[in-house]
Amino acid sequence: MSLAAWQSLWTAVLYGGLGLFAVVSVYVAIAGFWDIRRMLSALAAEARESGETSGSDPTD
Amino acid sequence: MNTCTCFRRPRVCATTEHVAADLSLTGIDLAIIACYLAGSVVIGLWANRVTTGLRGYLVAGHSLGTALSVATMTGSELGLITVMYQAQKGFTGGFAALHIGVIAGLVALFVGLTGLIVVPLRRAGVMTIPEFYEQRFGRKTRVLGGTLLAVGGLLNMGLFLRIGSQFIVAVSGLDPSGGTLPAIMTGLLVLVLIYTVLGGMVSVVLTDYIQFVVLSAGLLLTVFLLLQQFGLDTLFATVDHHLGPAGLDPTIGEAGFGPGYISWMAVLGLVSVAIWPTAVTRALCARDEQVVKNQYILSSIGFLVRFMLPCLLGICAFTWLSQAPDTTLLTSSGGELVPASSGEVVTHFQVAGGRIQENIEAFPAMLPEVLPVGLLGIVCAAMLAALMSTHDSYLLCWASVIAHDVIAPVRASRGRPLSEPGQLLLTRVLIVAVGLWVLIWGVFYSPSQDVWDYIGITGAVYFTGAIAVLLGGLYWSRASATGAVLALLAGLSAIVGLGPVQRALGFVEPIPSWQVGLITLGISAVAMAAGSLLFPDKNVGGTTK
């Protein structure tokens, strides 16, 4: 590969990578928030179940 | 004291003593950083309220969705240590160093599309990799695998805190002599320990999410501003002037790369995404197998960027130093520092007769000179976010391996099993112990090789054996417990890649770490195959031997 080709490749990789990362960052920032809510609900449900089993609620 | 004009922004400095005796950070910058640190700790502490049981503490109840998985994986794998060592690679290797990121991104994409290793591991329902060893090869393999994993991991993590503190010292302009470095290391460690010990994985995931948002915004903003300031053409011209073709073409060995190094990077790429426990733990936390695949496909961008952007920052730092007047670029020759000429790797630098600094400090030293007030605070907060998100994950990971895969199985085999609360308490105590180890190692050990190469070879102590054992265990029905044990032990030979070990063994010419790593990988693969064929398990295909 010529040096000009390497330069073009790294330029494309840099700008392509930056663009993709910006898009993924916005998606993760928004969708991640809803995932957190789901995770907390799941953990709370699990805590309730284990509380019922042991007779006390560990989140209290 | 006089006004120094050697930087873009005039600073007060004592030219005969220290290039920047005063703080580079303003009150606004410090306030932003303080708010961020306090916020992280408060949220981490709050997580303690919703964490119950060992499954919640270690793998967040297997409840992570795709976006949160990507955030926590990127947050923990894109640490300040990564930013620093890849900036160092960009500084010394130029654009050719970008190949590391490209390979890592492609490998992550391949793992995401095929589910190689991570999907069958998630299907097995285990919480750690050594737990799978026990399912497949028996308890002894689990304990051995867990021990080697802990040894490799603790050595690997040993420099994280030191490098993070070097960043803070360099970016703030503090004098690193005396107790400054240990004091910063201790302060950072205490903050991370507080919320990790209490909240476990839930705390880690929540703080990782915030850290991902701050980090990605800070990193993108920094790169955008630096590209505007320097211009990509100037960066290419500077690299070409100093490194020649080797600064663009990674197949040329002069900048420290070449075909062998590239092969080693492919191995490290696979390891980073599918073998390294902190990354694999994210797959094991996922809700289901499809989430695992999506997580890796999306994270491939993160794996590309975690190497690519810091490399670019290192190239910017090199260009900044090349343009700054009164700057001397130095190289190490025969144990002494001499001015570097074109084509030679710059190991140190000196600005305006000030303190001689290591090349890894170039990137943080550049930031106060090129970023405006306020933005510098945001970027520093982003870098601290990177440091904390990596530390919390690693502390939890190694502590849980020692507790869950070494101590608990040994006690169980002696008829004194640990209760679940007992394991939780032990994990918390070990998190603190691992933190103290990192602090002590960081104070006393100074690496004689590039930090990335140090990290690669210390990780190899574990992963060269683990690659053979995981691939064999998951995809080869004839893989036996004896083969697994031999492969894991063979991986220990990677320790020869460390500079002090080579000197102790009397090697005159140092062997590059990538050569040691590839040879160790080959030995481990042969050990796995030979051991399995010569000493097959009695119950082939069974689950517990």
Image (cartoon, coloured by chain):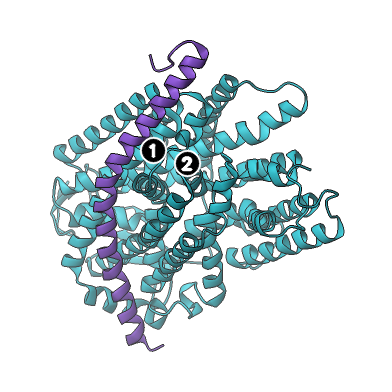
* Numbered badge on residue B285: 2
**Residue B398 location (% of width, % of height):** 55, 38
* For residue B480, side relative to residue B263 (left or right): right
Q: Residue furthest bottom?
A: A2
Helix, strand, or loop for circle 1? helix
Label 1 marks a residue whose chain is: B
Q: Amino acid at mark 1?
A: Val
User: Left or right of B273: which side holds B319?
Assistant: left
Q: In the rendered image, which residue does mark 1 sit on?
A: B205
Q: Amino acid at mark 2?
A: Cys
Of pointers 2 and 1, the one earlier in the residue sequence:
1
Report x, y in % for residue B207.
34, 37
Horizontal relation, residue B252 to residue B485: left or right: left
Q: Residue furthest top?
A: A55
Q: Count the marks: how many?
A: 2
Image quadrant in which the C terminus of chain B is located: top right
